[in-house]
Structure formats: structure tokens, C-alpha cells
């Protein structure tokens, strides 16, 4: 539908255009429909992820001072196990991509 609707003018056969606006029955429901999922994502996704990231760069969580401490990253990247797991992950991703492309190509 267009933003304007045609309504017959009183006492005439000529249509009168009336702008659709607040009287179209939507009311504040569109705002609720937008804010409610946003609030849910903020509380149950964004805040926990931000808290985990902040604890990860903030050093000891029990004695958090607010200073950035990247020691944990250095220790993690220095381990052989980290690089082995990263290599396995990238290898599986590459193999999955190759298999998906091979199966998806028409014969």
C-alpha cells in the first residue's frame, strides 16, 4: 500500500487523500518489538562477552585493578599446544571447504 489512502470526501464523489500516520493501529508496538530483542542481546550476550574480555586483559580477576595485563596472552601464545590446536582447526576448516566445494560442483 502507499503512504496515502483514498477516502471519499463527504457529500462528493471525489476521493480525498488522507495521510496514514499514528492512527494506523501500530502505536508503540514497533518500539517494543525493536527494544525488547536489543535489550535481551545486551544483557545475555554483549555484557557477558565484554566481561570475559575485560577479565582476560585485566590480569587476576580476584584482585582486579583495572590495569591492562597481556601476560596471559603471551603465556598462551608461547605454548606448543596452542599452535597444534590452531593448526588442527585451520586444517579441518580447509578440508571442510574443499569437500563442500567438491560436492557442490555440478558434474
Image (tube, rainbow, N blue to C red):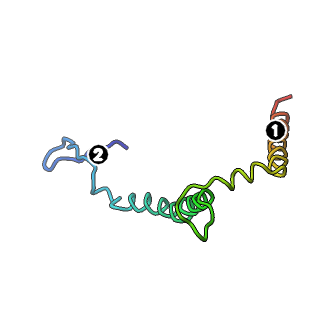
What residue is rendered at 33% in x and 61% in y? 27
* Front position in the image: 87 or 24: 87
Identify the residue under disc 1: 94
Say whether residue 16 is left or right of residue 92: left
At x 27%, y 51%, the residue is 21
Of residues 50 and 64, the one drawn nearer to the viewer in this rendering = 64
Q: Residue at x 80, y 51 (%)?
A: 79
Res 94 → quadrant: top right
Residue 76 appears in the figure: yes
Assign the C terminus to one quadrant of the image: top right
Q: Secondary structure at mark 1?
A: helix
Side of 103 relative to 76 (left or right): right
Height in image: 68 above or below 19? below
The residue beneath circle 2 is 5
Quadrant housing the N terminus: top left
Q: In the rendered structure, are the residues bearing label 1 and label 2 in contact, judged by CB atoms less than 8 Å apart?
A: no
Place of residue 41 in the rendered image (x, y in percent of width and height, measured from the top left): 53, 60
Amino acid at each position: 500500500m502507499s503512504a496515502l489512502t483514498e477516502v471519499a470526501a463527504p457529500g462528493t464523489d471525489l476521493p480525498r487523500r488522507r495521510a496514514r500516520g499514528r492512527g494506523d493501529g501500530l502505536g508503540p508496538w514497533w518500539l517494543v518489538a525493536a527494544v525488547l530483542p536489543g535489550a535481551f542481546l545486551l544483557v545475555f550476550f554483549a555484557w557477558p562477552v565484554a566481561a570475559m574480555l575485560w577479565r582476560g586483559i585485566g590480569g587476576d580477576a580476584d584482585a582486579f585493578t583495572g590495569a591492562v595485563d597481556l601476560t596471559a596472552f603471551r603465556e598462551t601464545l608461547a605454548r606448543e599446544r596452542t599452535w597444534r590446536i590452531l593448526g588442527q582447526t585451520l586444517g579441518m576448516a580447509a578440508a571442510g571447504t574443499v569437500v563442500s566445494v567438491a560436492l557442490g560442483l555440478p558434474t
